[in-house]
Image (cartoon, rainbow, N blue to C red):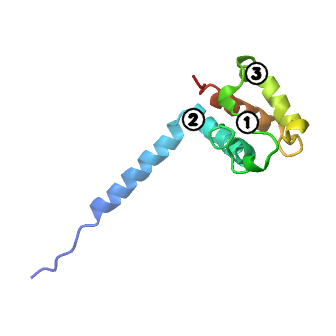
Amino acid sequence: MQKYRPQKIPTVWYIFSVLVIFVLFLIFMPANFRTRSEDRFLYLAHCSPCHGENGQGEGRASQTLYFQAKDFRTLPTELFENIEKIQMIIAAGIQEKAMPSFANELDATEIKRIASYVQVLSKERLP
């Protein structure tokens, strides 16, 4: 009488197929999706403590501020459409509103990426 041996080949093929699909997804994933997630990572690391995860001005550190952190959904159109102005604010800070300068922490590319992400948040306008 032969001993029963479970087949492991289907499991191996299943794992291999999943890995191939995952690698193909990473290769062909839209570049703007990758860029946006990297921009969001920078924003979360440097801005979300005050401005909140979604830019509503309700970050965990915002309760300790003298002024309410800016809700990006209420930015005036002329500001949220001007990426250079947003970059300047990120780099220089706003001393009278307790916003620090990030010029010594971030390079110009990182500042531009955060500004770009702030624009994305700003486009989620309040009615």
Which badge, 1 or 3, comes first in the chain's sequence? 3
- Of residues 49 and 116, the one nearer the viewer is 49
**Which label is found at residue 33?**
2
Q: Where, by quadrant of the figure, is residue 72 drawn?
A: top right
- Of residues 76 and 90, the one nearer the viewer is 76
Q: Where, by quadrant of the figure, is residue 33 drawn?
A: top right
User: Which residue type does callout 2 highlight?
Assistant: Phe
**Place of residue 74 in the rendered image (x, y in percent of width and height, measured from the top left):** 68, 26
Question: Is any atom of residue 124 visible in this view?
Answer: yes
Tell me: 50 left or right of 12: right
Question: Is any atom of residue 93 visible in this view?
Answer: no
2 vs 3, front mark: 3
Residue at the spot of label 1 = 114
Q: Where, by quadrant of the figure, is residue 84 drawn?
A: top right
**Place of residue 64 in the rendered image (x, y in percent of width and height, measured from the top left):** 78, 50
Q: Residues within 10 Å of mark 3 (few under 14, many from 20)?
A: few
- Helix, strand or loop at disc 3? helix
- Helix, strand or loop at disc 1? helix
Residue at the spot of label 3 = 79
Quadrant location of the C terminus in the rendered image: top right
**Which label is found at residue 73?**
none
Question: Residue drawn at (28%, 66%), measured in percent from left and top?
Answer: 8
Q: How far apart are marks 2 and 3 (CA)?
A: 24 Å
